[in-house]
Image: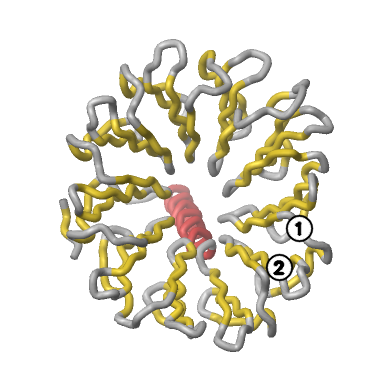
Amino acid sequence: MISLLPWRRSDFLFRILFLYIVFRAGTLSLEAQQLAAYHDNQGSFFIFDNGKTIQAEHLPVQNFSVGGTCILYSDNRNNLKMYYQGKISTLEVNPVNKFQALDYLSVYSIGSVVKIIENGSVITITTYAVQYQAEDSLVTFYDSGRQLLAVYYKGRIHILEDGLVGRPSNFFHSADNLVAWVSSRTGELKVFSQGQIRDIEPFVPNGSFKAGRNIVAYISPSEQKFKVYYKDTGFLLEDFPPASYQVGDDMVAYVDNTGTFKLFTEGETYEITSFEPDFYQVRNKMIIYGEQGYFKSWYNGRPYLLETFIPSDWQAGWNTILYLDQSKNIKIFSRGSGKILTYDLAEKTELYRDLIVVNKGMNNCNVYYRGKKY
């Protein structure tokens, strides 16, 4: 149940070029959500790529991570492999500490060595990392050998701060396209965005701040006011610290000191409810929350009622929410509309961006992609 709370030649050529760019941007965004992976009932490892299914391994893999452009997995012999544009390659024959395939970049580490995968190529960014955070378009790391904080972004390593001694503790937060940190030398809250470093205001290392796409929300230590830095502009949201807050893509959801549930997005603040929600989480551009036992979502500027109960288990990412209704049907809410995806009983479901894998039991899997079942 979903309820809605005459041209010159130069002008012509310009508009054709503009439409092409828009079309390509849309196409690229679609191409970045075409991948999934699963095991079949014989234990073989399969990869789904834009409507095609490929048997990648005959034996079960130990672990895998599905990204927007590639899939990383550790095979039966603990080799790290990558699926990229229809081809499988071996990246490492020795065990790795951890690996992540993200929307655009992917990253893995062997001891203190951190390597990034961009456009199918592997790049070593540091050999002395004791701490790093990987996000969609950047990887932030503290290099203990050179005693500096740096970020890999768009093919370059940018030094954020050098001359550091010891290991900083939780003093930086990364998001898809920016990094916020407290300078060990000046004590200021700083932001790296679009290749530039900007000073926000004096801070303390243990002050509260969180980063999202294009946005940083924080509680000013000196004034105890709740503020936002958004697209090179500062905003005062509240004169008192909020009870809680979360950040996402171009948005901050929070409960203020009076219990009012609010949203800041695109430079404006909105009241979602006048009372504290049962729970809330921000995923990309969606807010998923409970309101007096009802399951709801705030998406594209308006609230939606999804169910008159709160599911015990749900998943959300990009534009999609996936959950079971009270009859155990698999339901989705995606891009402002909801429907039953399948009446099949599911042992397990996985959401990879806007693509869904349904395991009906004994690794009998179906993939749901662009309105089709595979």
Residue nearest the observer in this picture, 5 or 183 = 183
Residue nearest the observer in this picture, 170 or 231 = 170
Rendered location of residue 2, percent (x, y): 19, 62
Residue hosting label 2: 74
- The residue sitting at 82% across, 30% down in the picture is 146
Q: How far apart are marks 2 and 1 (CA)?
A: 9 Å
Rendered location of residue 233, percent (x, y): 44, 24
Mark 2 or mark 1: whose residue is earlier in sequence? 2
Few, some or many residues within 10 Å of mark 2 (<14, 14–19, 20+): many
Colour pattern of the rendering = secondary structure
At numbered mark 1, what does the secondary structure look like: helix, strand or loop? Answer: loop
**89 on left or right of 47:** right
Asked if residue 9 shows in the view, the reply is: no
Rendered location of residue 113, percent (x, y): 80, 47
Question: Residue 101 falls in which quadrant of the image?
Answer: bottom right
Asked if residue 298 shows in the view, the reply is: yes
- Considering the image in quadrants, where does the N terminus appear? bottom left
Residue nearest the observer in this picture, 359 or 146 = 359
Which of the labelled discs sits on residue 236, or is there none? none
Residue type of the residue flagged with mark 1: Val
The residue lying furthest to the top in this view is 222
**187 on left or right of 27:** right
Residue hosting label 1: 96
Is mark 2 in CB contact (under 8 Å) with mark 1?
A: yes
Rendered location of residue 307, percent (x, y): 21, 61
- The residue sitting at 56% across, 27% down in the picture is 191
Residue type of the residue flagged with mark 2: Ser
